[in-house]
Image (cartoon, helix red, strand yellow):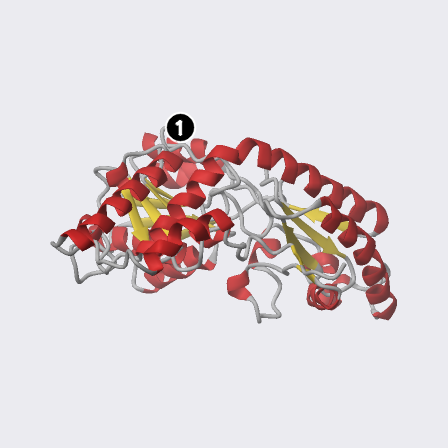
């Protein structure tokens, strides 16, 4: 196969041609500032309003509950740090051990500043104990913010966000969810999931990089994270990224209208890839909750070898995958997600992620199935480790 086989869509995705088409005019003739008083800028403001309505339809919320941002990292920080600034140091924060760094690092910064922060552990498939969550909320003597991701970026494990949200509501806690990986791959209905805040990034589901959105439910107490202007109803200052906003709205529309059919196709290809890997590569395990995961994501640990070596050799063959979060690339430490799930030492360093998209084809999956097993065999033949190795060697 001559072309690149791109199976790293949880890191970023190709911008859909339909998205490019709708955003292009706003890079040219429709360049007015939507905040301007004149008609040339005012016409652009109307497009931004329509885009807000489309994103609201994607969330099943009200348009005035949508805040456009630069990405989900900004949205996560705005939700966590903005809530903490409103309530002060008396606020307690509850999150999970498998969150993206865009959640974990702000929480840990707040802990260093004096906030009580609890990182809930997960079980072997990456799920938290809901009873433990409820205990943390029952015992709280201060306002509580809970931040738990909708779907894990490394394993695809889907959390019971509806149940988490209802537990939070029952105890008066504020609930934020990082829905970056869920967007475009799972139904997001904020009438069914009573979250107070939610974060997404456009580039994860075929919009360009540099645009995201944050849902803030009416009545949620939050200090603005970005100051300096009146934009986004004074909730996020800065001149609007109009081309990105238009693009995000189109990506939301494409995802909303084609979700069920696309998920069925992706799940079928993912399952075929998984079955072939397990059949052709012994001493291999699937990571995450296989009963509750995104249809496009497969995380596998190959025992006795390094995930980085697998990724490099697949890259030489034109196949793009990941060993974990793109935001942690460059680190040789095992994934914090895989560690939190208690994956055995012999498999800890051999974890890789395959993440598919609407542009993935059956032909590409066939190529991976043919290419991967010989690479695994070669690496194991070269490895000094094996079934009889002391597991502590891998620490």
For this rendering, which residue is in front, 318 or 120? 318
Task: Name the residue rendered at 15%, 55% in the picture.
Answer: 230
Q: Quadrant of residue 262?
A: top right
Relative depth, front residue between 395 and 298? 298
Q: Nearer the viewer, residue 171 or 22?
A: 22
Q: Residue furthest top?
A: 192
Residue 333 image-quadrant placement: bottom right
Q: Which residue is mark 1?
A: 192
Q: Label 1: how many residues lie within 10 Å, few (<14), some (14-19) or many (20+)?
A: few
Above or below: residue 278 compared with residue 379: above
Residue 114: % across, % down? 30, 61
Count every numbered label the image shows and give the total.
Answer: 1
- What residue is drawn where x is 82% and y is 53%? 370
Q: Residue 179, can we see it? A: yes
Q: The N terminus is located in which quarter?
A: bottom right
Provide residue 224's location: percent of width, then percent of height: 22, 54
Task: Please say whether residue 290 is visible from this viewpoint.
Answer: no
Which residue is located at x 31 percent, y 50 percent? 68
Q: Taking 202 as reference, is 75 left or right?
A: left
Q: Which SS class for mark 1?
A: loop
State the quadrant of the C terminus.
bottom right
Residue 287, given in percent of the width and then of the height, sits at 66, 48
């Amino acid at each position: 196969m001559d072309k690149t086989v791109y199976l790293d869509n949880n890191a970023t995705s190709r911008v859909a041609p339909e998205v490019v088409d709708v955003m292009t005019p706003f890079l040219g003739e429709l360049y007015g500032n939507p905040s301007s008083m004149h008609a040339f800028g005012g016409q652009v403001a109307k497009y931004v309003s329509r885009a807000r309505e489309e994103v609201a339809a994607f969330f099943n919320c009200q348009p005035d509950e949508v805040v456009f941002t630069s990405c989900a990292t900004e949205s996560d920080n705005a939700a966590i740090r903005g809530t903490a600034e409103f309530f002060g140091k008396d606020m307690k924060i509850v999150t999970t051990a498998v969150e993206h760094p865009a959640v974990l690092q702000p929480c840990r910064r707040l802990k260093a500043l004096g906030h009580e922060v609890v990182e809930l552990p997960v079980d072997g498939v990456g799920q938290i104990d809901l009873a433990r969550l409820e205990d943390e909320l029952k015992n709280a003597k201060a306002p509580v913010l809970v931040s738990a991701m909708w779907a894990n970026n490394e394993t695809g494990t889907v959390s019971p966000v509806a149940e988490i949200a209802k537990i939070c509501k029952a105890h008066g806690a504020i609930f934020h969810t990082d829905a970056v990986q869920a967007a475009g791959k799972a139904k997001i209905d904020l009438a069914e999931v009573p979250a107070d805040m939610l974060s997404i990034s456009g580039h994860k589901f075929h919009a360009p990089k540099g645009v995201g959105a944050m849902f803030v439910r009416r009545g949620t107490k939050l200090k603005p994270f970005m100051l300096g202007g009146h934009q986004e109803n004074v909730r996020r200052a800065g001149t609007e990224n109009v081309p990105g906003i238009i693009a995000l709205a189109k990506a939301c529309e494409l995802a909303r209208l084609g979700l069920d059919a696309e998920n069925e196709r992706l799940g079928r290809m993912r399952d075929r890839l998984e079955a072939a890997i397990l059949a052709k590569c012994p001493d291999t395990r699937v990571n995450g909750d296989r009963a509750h995961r995104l249809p496009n994501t497969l995380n596998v640990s190959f025992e006795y070898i390094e995930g980085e070596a697998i990724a490099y050799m697949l890259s030489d063959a034109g196949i793009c995958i990941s060993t974990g979060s793109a935001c942690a690339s460059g680190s040789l430490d095992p994934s914090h997600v895989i560690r939190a799930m208690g994956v055995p030492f012999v498999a800890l360093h051999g974890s890789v992620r395959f993440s598919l998209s609407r542009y993935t084809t059956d032909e590409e999956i066939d190529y991976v199935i043919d290419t991967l097993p010989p690479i695994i065999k070669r690496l194991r033949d070269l490895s000094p480790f094996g079934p009889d190795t002391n597991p502590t060697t891998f620490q």
